[in-house]
Image (cartoon, coloured by chain):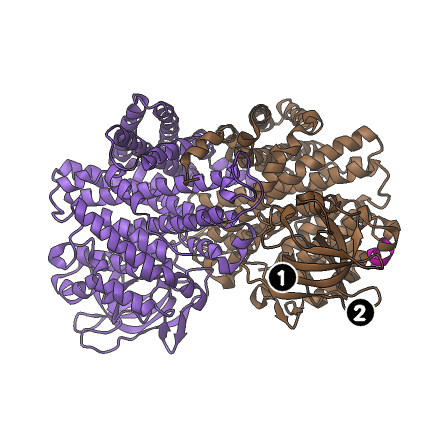
Chain colours: A brown, B purple
């Protein structure tokens, strides 16, 4: 089953939902014109459809192989990676003066969705390199930038994030890898890191490992962690003292080498200052979190496309109210059509959240006005955990529904639907489990700047409610009412969370994140519906596409937004009721 | 990770929730005493824990192998099967006069849950044999019973159900396998069947295939289908003309051979009369549907146990409000405890539905009074699709949550958590997809006997509400209020479904089944809470266990039952709103 880049969806989300016009107005992206956007999306679509997508099953079937410290990626991966480098895709969203294309993150996310949808295992390589580039730009010295940034921006070199150790997963502060100072100002890094994505591979000339470690006498916990640049090949051309000693046998993403890395006095250079590792890590992590959310959208889109194609092709039974001789294609069965509608609506909602989060990231950096930048930063910080967790929950849910639409064929590996579920299942786990995202949302994000982030969000949602309820289109006012109920529910939950102690907050974290995702996703679908209505009136674009935007928002309002009041009951349950269930602890 | 049979849970469900006392009162099961029940559950637990559970990972890793038409099951499967036969487990729930143990289906389901929880791939063999036995008892001639029943009841021979063909999955009526009459009254069966569970294997001496086929001149569709007994080894000892020509490469249940069977003029005997195949199929299917629901409970229980053990063992971070030095076991983190509580509550609810369905099946056959039998039959028919679909949805959900509790380790195959998700994922598909169950529920079941099945259910739920709201325990009246809301929602949905046309009904089928599962499951947790309260007052049993029953019901009421009103919005959305989403059809 092939992948088709959802260009219409991406363009509509960029232009009408995530409001990139404001981004253009900053003047920070002179090349970010409609024409160039269209050209870039189409070129990326070709790469995704013709180069990366055909390797998706290959990667799943072949896995990665480790022999004598060298990892062989699946057949075709190195050649595809070369094409990725050739196209300059790695540098798309980085400043032109550094060697990038100078385009906004918003467009980068749209391109990334296609790459991830086409081939999640392949896409992980470039995704990790983004993090390395961002850490270098934000925290590297001029010399470090000079040494590494150019090759990373072209993709000739790739980067990794080395955080996790067996005893230090979500609790990064528990790590034990050591860094001892060398006489020349470099450091000797020793320790073992696990779950290192693309830790070793045969696609790039060099791999720049960004490794968290402790310097001698550093404080305990997260305060005593430093970040080091540890290249596989040293600047003098010699091989560094590090190697992959294991490749994990995983449920999915078989084409992505997940390595155990061993550092035995490897030479590294401090980046961002001693004991400032957590700050550097969050630079990489924040970007990675949004990107993982985009993976959720990408894999969901792919699973949806495959299920839709199967439902249009597979004939079974006599569908009610359907013309032509039976058997009918199963898409005519109301339950199948409902399932596909749910998949499509949730994908559109999570895509809108991810692209909006990217726009906020761009605006936080480039808006002219300082207040505007601060507000955009708050929006980015609020949306990042939602984009990561809610979109990846949807990735798993939609991939599972995709298997179900296939019936028995979905359970057979040859069909390919099961691979999407296996691949998607990692996304709620890595780069901070979805529970960690939820805790971030009800913890630091809730009271940030006196709760301004949520107040501003609620105000924006209120404007969309106003636009819906005053619309002359018969479908829009009821949509506004549903959104109002959802907003009221979210306000109620926020008010409760602000009142209670931290234990109760933590107990309500996950349902609150779900409520936030469902509400914000619904809001953005309503924004899309209002824009679609405007397009209809002004005769812009495909009328069927516009009508579908309104229908999707309506469907979502009934099937998903109506859940909001029950989510509040769940959020406000309190920790005592959970403690009473017991488990002998 | 090992499996521990949940004996306390099963006993409580049998004794206090599913009301097996009424079953004892029928006098149909003289051996069904508390002592024997305890002894049988404990023996079954030994088989599950010590024999079947250790083979679960073996089966996953080894898969089944097909060579020259012979299937080799994973190492240890044949020996384990021999122990299963030795223990007489296959005949547990069949009449003593036929060679069974003469015990009720309710106890059979409890035993089956342990077998499935221990090893889903293994458990499928005996599960299919049940169906064969039931078809023979209900529809076989005396001669057929004489020939096959004895060996099937001991398990020395196994049985299969041959329904599916490439073009005939959910639409059984589209099948093409032919049956031509032979001169001696037997039939020559020719055709290909796919997805045949345990279609060929090395565990039993003979395999009795029950094959749906068309006789010459038979009417089109489901009206022209007949069922045939087609043994692998013919009564004269010769090999029949049938063979496995393929074994599927599946997402999970690798230890269960899913075969493509080829019949090339194989000798078969008609069972149940010409063109009466659908009726016979439903005899097998109804039983199989409940049993698949039990699989959902079993695999969820296993996934829960593994996640609980991991959460108690894995130390990460500093948990709030927790004594002792950090790092703390992750079960102390409120979000993890919430997840485990949700898993446990949903398992208890789905187990209660499955055991109650089994009790209804027993009562439908053995209650003394004809009206009581008819009412029990209605309850069985109402609960069967709910038991199948809702429990298997929970199997997948809980197995996925189990992966999540493990964090990164959950994604590594060696951990075993991922296998449960892969294994569970088939259960919402086979024996009638969950959509088919939902369609059955809003179709035939809704208006059966003028809607009596739902009226009776609502009346029973009302009694439990009364018991809760009048209780002196402070937790029970609010529980009664939540159950009342859930019941009101279900009534509203039923009233709407009865009013609208079939297309709207079909569009609302899946959310209605979910609403039914959540409401009935919640009701039965409330029944358990009321019983636990009685035990507390009468000082019966473990007080901590009783308190947990009440806490679980409370937790479920807030986290799940509160969803009921939104389910109604989803049910009553109507097909038009779905049609508007489009998909070009």
Q: Position of residue B61 (x, y in %)?
A: 45, 66
Q: Position of residue A510 (x, y in %)?
A: 54, 37
> On the image, numbered disc 2 is attached to which residue?
A238
Q: Quadrant of residue A144?
A: bottom right
Instruction: Determine if marks 1 and 2 fall on one subunit.
Output: yes
Which residue is nearer to you in this view: B165 or A458? A458
Q: Secondary structure at mark 1?
A: strand
Q: Main secondary structure of the magenta part?
A: helix
Q: Is residue A97 left or right of residue B205?
A: right
Q: Position of residue B480 (x, y in %)?
A: 35, 25
**Is residue B367 at least partly visible in the picture?**
no
Region rendered in magenta: A145-151
Which residue is nearer to you in this view: A6 or A474? A6
Q: Position of residue B65 (x, y in %)?
A: 41, 72
Q: Secondary structure at mark 2?
A: loop
> On the image, numbered disc 1 is attached to which residue?
A260
The numbered disc on residue A276 is none
């Amino acid at each position: 089953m092939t992948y088709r880049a959802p260009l219409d969806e991406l363009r509509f989300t960029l232009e009408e939902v995530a409001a990139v016009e404001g981004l253009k107005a900053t003047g920070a992206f002179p090349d970010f014109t409609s024409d160039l956007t269209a050209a870039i999306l189409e070129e990326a679509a070709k790469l995704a459809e013709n180069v990366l997508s055909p390797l998706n099953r290959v990667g799943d079937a072949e896995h990665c192989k480790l022999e004598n410290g060298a990892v062989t990626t699946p057949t075709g991966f190195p050649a595809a990676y070369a094409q990725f480098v050739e196209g300059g895709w790695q540098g798309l969203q980085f400043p032109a003066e550094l060697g990038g294309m100078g385009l906004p993150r918003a467009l980068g996310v749209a391109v990334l969705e296609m790459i991830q949808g086409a081939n999640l295992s392949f896409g992980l390589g470039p995704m990790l390199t983004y993090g390395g580039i961002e850490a270098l730009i934000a925290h590297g010295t001029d010399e470090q930038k000079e040494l590494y940034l150019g090759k990373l921006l072209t993709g000739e070199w790739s980067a990794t994030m080395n955080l996790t150790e067996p005893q230090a997963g979500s609790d990064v502060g528990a790590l034990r890898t050591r860094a001892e100072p060398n006489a020349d100002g470099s450091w000797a890094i020793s320790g073992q890191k696990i779950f290192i994505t693309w830790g070793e591979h045969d696609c790039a000339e060099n791999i720049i490992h960004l490794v968290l470690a402790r310097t001698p006498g550093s404080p305990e916990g997260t305060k005593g962690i430093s970040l080091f640049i540890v290249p596989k090949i040293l600047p003098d051309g010699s091989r560094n003292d590090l190697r992959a000693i294991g490749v994990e046998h995983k449920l999915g993403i078989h084409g992505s080498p997940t390595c155990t890395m061993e550092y035995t006095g490897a030479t590294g250079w401090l980046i961002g200052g001693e004991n400032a590792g957590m700050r550097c890590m969050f630079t990489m992590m924040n970007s990675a979190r949004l990107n993982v959310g985009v993976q959720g959208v990408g894999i969901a889109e792919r699973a949806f496309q495959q299920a839709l194609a199967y439902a249009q092709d597979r004939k079974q039974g006599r569908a009610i109210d359907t013309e032509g001789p039976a058997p009918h294609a199963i898409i005519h069965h109301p339950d199948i059509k409902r399932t596909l509608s749910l998949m499509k609506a949730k994908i559109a909602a999570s895509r809108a959240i991810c692209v909006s989060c990217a726009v906020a990231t761009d605006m936080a950096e480039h808006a002219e006005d300082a207040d505007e930048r601060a507000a955009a930063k708050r929006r980015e910080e609020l949306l990042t955990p939602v984009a990561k967790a809610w979109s990846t929950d949807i990735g798993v849910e939609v991939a599972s529904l995709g298997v179900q639409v296939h019936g028995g064929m979905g359970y057979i590996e040859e069909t390919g639907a099961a691979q999407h579920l296996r691949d998607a299942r990692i996304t709620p786990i890595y780069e901070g489990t979805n529970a960690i995202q939820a805790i971030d949302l009800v913890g630091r994000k809730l009271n940030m700047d006196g709760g301004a982030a949520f107040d501003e969000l609620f105000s924006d949602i209120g404007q969309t409610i106003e636009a819906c309820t005053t619309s002359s289109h018969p479908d829009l006012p009821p949509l506004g009412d549903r959104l109002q109920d959802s907003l009221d529910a979210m306000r109620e939950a926020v008010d409760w969370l602000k009142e209670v102690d931290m234990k109760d907050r933590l107990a309500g974290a996950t349902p609150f994140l779900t409520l936030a995702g469902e509400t914000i996703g619904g809001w953005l679908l309503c924004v899309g519906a209002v824009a679609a209505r405007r397009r209809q009136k002004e005769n812009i674009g495909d009328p069927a596409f516009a009508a579908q935007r309104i229908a999707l928002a309506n469907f979502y309002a009934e099937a998903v937004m109506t859940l909001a009041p029950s989510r509040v009951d769940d959020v406000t349950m309190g920790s005592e009721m959970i403690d009473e269930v017991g488990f002998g602890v």
